[in-house]
């Protein structure tokens, strides 16, 4: 079974670039949302990995969305943001932070890494551009 990827990003072109890159790499993107409400609706599709921006169209709700997805849905969260300092507390299910702009290759490598970490086996070195969060 392929990983099911959820993208929560309010910048259309950024979200589209991530979606196309992931689909080209063989991943299933189950949806793209831009706020808390759309994240909750799309989470019903059981994502494996969520790529979540911090500052969305309804404010700085990304950390709350990520915590909810990690705790309630059980998916692994990678934050994708231009301001990683906004993640200042441990967030359940959050693996790391990618700094925008991130090209589609970096996004795919981060998802590959997240899946390896999620499987519980030995994980490779984190890819360039992904900073792991300490829990």
Image (tube, rainbow, N blue to C red):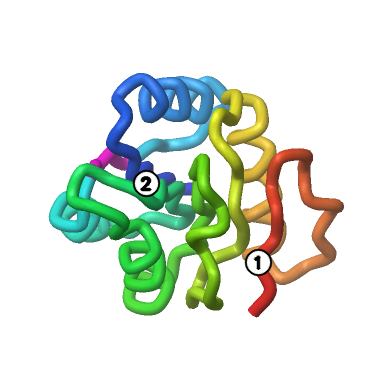
Query: Image check: 130 left or right of 19?
Result: right
Residue at coordinates 33% horizontally, 72% vertically from top-left?
A: 68
Describe residue 66's horizontal placement relative to residue 1 as left or right: left
Q: Position of residue 86 (x, y in %)?
A: 49, 60
Residue behind mark 2: 6
- In this view, 40 is above or below 83: below
Disc 2 secondary structure class = strand
Q: Position of residue 7 (x, y in %)?
A: 37, 42
What residue is shown at x 71% (from left), y 71% (from top)? 120
Q: Is residue 116 above or below residue 15?
A: below
Task: Indicate whether 97 appears above or below 105.
Answer: below
Q: Is residue 2 visible?
A: no
Find residue 125 and report its horizontal and vertical position in percent.
Answer: 85, 52
The one of 45 and 17 positioned closer to us in this rendering = 17
Mark closer to the observer (2, 1): 1
The quadrant holding residue 28 is top left
Which residue, given by chain and number where applicable, does mark 1 sit on?
Answer: 133
Magenta stretch bounds? 30-34
Query: Would you identify the image quadrant in which residue 34 lies?
Result: top left
Residue 40's place in the image compared with 10, above or below, is below
Q: CA distance from mark 2 to mark 1?
A: 20 Å
């Amino acid at each position: 079974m392929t990983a099911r990827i959820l993208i929560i990003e309010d910048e259309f072109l950024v979200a589209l670039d991530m979606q196309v890159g992931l689909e080209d790499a063989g991943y299933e993107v189950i949806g793209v949302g831009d706020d808390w409400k759309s994240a909750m609706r799309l989470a019903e599709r059981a994502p494996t990995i969520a790529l979540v921006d911090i500052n969305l169209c309804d404010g700085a709700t990304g950390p709350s969305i990520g915590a909810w997805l990690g705790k309630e849905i059980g998916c692994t969260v990678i934050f994708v943001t231009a301001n990683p300092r906004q993640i200042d507390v441990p967030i359940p299910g959050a693996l790391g932070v990618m700094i925008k702009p991130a090209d589609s290759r970096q996004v795919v490598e981060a998802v590959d890494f997240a899946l390896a970490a999620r499987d519980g086996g030995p994980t490779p070195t984190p890819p360039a551009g992904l900073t792991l969060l300490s829990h």
